[in-house]
Image: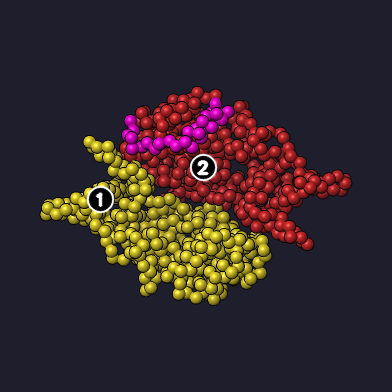
Chain colours: A yellow, B red
Amino acid sequence: MPAKTKLPSRRTKDLAAGKLESLATAVVEQAHRKKDPEVLIPARMLSNVAFNEKTRHIEMGDAKQSRSLFNYGQAKRFMQTLLVASKCKELISRGKSASIRQIFYLSKHTIKGTNEKTFDNQEESDPIIEDVEVAIDALREELHVFASNRGNLVGPITIVDAGNTLDCTIMGSAGYAVPSICEPEQIQFKKCQAKYILHVEKDTVWRRFYEDRFWDKHQCIVSHGGGQPARGMRRLLQRMHQELDLPVFVLLDNDPWGYYIYSVIKHGSINLAYESRRMAIPDAKFIGVSSFDYERCGLSDDVKIELDDGDIKRCKQIAAYPWFADKRPWQKEIKRLLDNGFKMEVEAMISKDLEYLTEDYVPMKLKDKKQWLD
Amino acid sequence: MPAKTKLPSRRTKDLAAGKLESLATAVVEQAHRKKDPEVLIPARMLSNVAFNEKTRHIEMGDAKQSRSLFNYGQAKRFMQTLLVASKCKELISRGKSASIRQIFYLSKHTIKGTNEKTFDNQEESDPIIEDVEVAIDALREELHVFASNRGNLVGPITIVDAGNTLDCTIMGSAGYAVPSICEPEQIQFKKCQAKYILHVEKDTVWRRFYEDRFWDKHQCIVSHGGGQPARGMRRLLQRMHQELDLPVFVLLDNDPWGYYIYSVIKHGSINLAYESRRMAIPDAKFIGVSSFDYERCGLSDDVKIELDDGDIKRCKQIAAYPWFADKRPWQKEIKRLLDNGFKMEVEAMISKDLEYLTEDYVPMKLKDKKQWLD
């Protein structure tokens, strides 16, 4: 499939900076008009989160919380919000970025003439960063704040990252390292001959696909997120899916953790529902490992890992999520896992043979749409 | 400094495969000579580990343990050892590699006519892999067994990895992803203009140096290991140090964990002492963060994190290691940390300014040899 480079809905440097400025200007204007300065923050709580059936995103509702300077219970968080916003504005102006820990250290100081610190620990500053994100409707990455780098990929795509043009078929044996910030400002797609993306859970599984040259034989991108994919990887997957029309297939362990990783990739996360719109991939398909594969693939007892109480509890929680609750195939899948009484790892597939996973299992899965879970 | 590409003491594919074959042949010959088949494994226990003052490596002694087929207590481990050895031999012959978890799944099966499994869990197979390593004096990587990929680097060096020629100044904003296997068979050095290596603890610190273009201004390689560096990163650092004559400077948090990471990079680890010879870098220098930097750099209270009981206990253990015990500067450093009563993170340095770490602190440290700890 040739690359169709649709223009991304680009949110430029100036846009985020402008919004931060508006936030500050509004506060100043309130003061000039002798009103109590306040900031309105969309409420980041479970009661304000819902599954949107149409977009298939986990989304935030319209509830807002006020944060006012002259309210004793809100004054500190009001100050912290503006402090973090100003640090982000500074980062954007200087063309620099900082980690959430660095934001903490940049913002932490003792308020003159007091013993009061602006922040006591990072547990205080992290939610404020999220507050600023939702307040101005910008992703953390647009505020130049980064999390950890995690995840790699290999395949026939050429990515321009920080001005470096990278052919992702020849990036060495650990592949292209996906950075924390994958916004259009930092990363552009140049050429893509891949037909789809296969996303796997762990780097050791990824290496199996790398080494067996799956990406070459099947002309696809193979990526991993090192467990639950970090924001950078999720954003990159979503952008490749949207801008390059690449279908996304997900291969995870057959356990509740695998189901949950899929759920986050597909619909977004409950905690950070405001980012779903630019991270979730509602069309992503789960291709395995399915609870039915034990029988379907004639696997031996060697692949079985007994479920513990935590697994069982978690399975029931996931089955009850609104976005799984009304899907018969998912209900059957989870019920079968519980009936099996055991879980299975992707790597267990190679107990048949080192190349069974890449030569037989995944090609079989990709070919038979009936085996996909949506 | 121009690249001096000394020939690495190359241990080829055939060498490791040959040694595995000799191991098996010896067992067969014992059987033909009607002797009890046995394998001798160097003892991997604390009592067989010592610090070699001359090489400055943590090394294994000469004690060996027998593992015999006709000894009821040893028969299972004898069988497991030969099973893992044969799987490694197969990997080498097929030109493939496998993770330690994949080795577990490849080796796990039910012994015919019994309910007995060859391995019950990975906790059983991991030490057997280490046994095979020491038995034939080969690194895990030479047996084609990989751990996790972790760590990245940026800087003026061209690395050939799996046949891909990679200019590490233009590998994107997460840098070159260091693979798990960094043996000469997989990785060669082509061109190097770097004057030294600066190794930092975390990826978020690394990104500070990447973004502030420290590697460019100072013509050096900046690497991180994502915490305690994985084997791949340690092996790569050691090879660049030895084959390219690059000094190695280490920048870690000012806490016992930072001291320990340094200790492992420099002298090797206690658990895996047999690998020191090809992973340790006895000439590596610790440049910070030092307990004396709080005063020396005029830092504010904002950088302080109180020591807990675990930190204090760990500091005392580390101070008592033979390779620290007779070094006055290290004793003073650790004593000062305990006297301070607080620890400091590398990222805390930026509480002064976002670029303080890269523009002031590290250049100051590198310039003044008296501040290095050896």
Query: Does any portion of residue B88 appear in the rendered image?
Result: yes
Q: Which residues are magenta?
A: B298-325
Callout 1: chain: A
Q: Is residue B317 magenta?
A: yes
The percent position of residue B299, horizontal first and vertical second, equals 34, 33
Q: Secondary structure at mark 1?
A: loop
Which residue shows up at 67% across the image and 65% down it? A300
Residues at marks 1 and 2, CA–CA distance in whole angstroms: 42 Å
Horizontal side of residue A118 vs A314, given as left or right? left
Residue A89 in sight in this render: no
Residue at left offset 47%, top offset 74%: A327
Q: Which mark is residue B116?
A: none
For residue A243, which quarter of the picture? bottom left
The residue located at (66%, 46%) in the rendering is B127
Badge 2 sits on which subunit? Answer: B
- Badge 1 is on which residue? A73
Between residue B90 and residue A147, name the one nearer to us: A147
Q: Is residue A138 above or below residue A93?
A: below
- Per the image, the residue denoted by label 2 is B228
Q: Amino acid at mark 2?
A: Gln
Q: Are marks 1 and 2 in contact (CB under 8 Å)?
A: no
Rendered view: A163 above or below A313? above
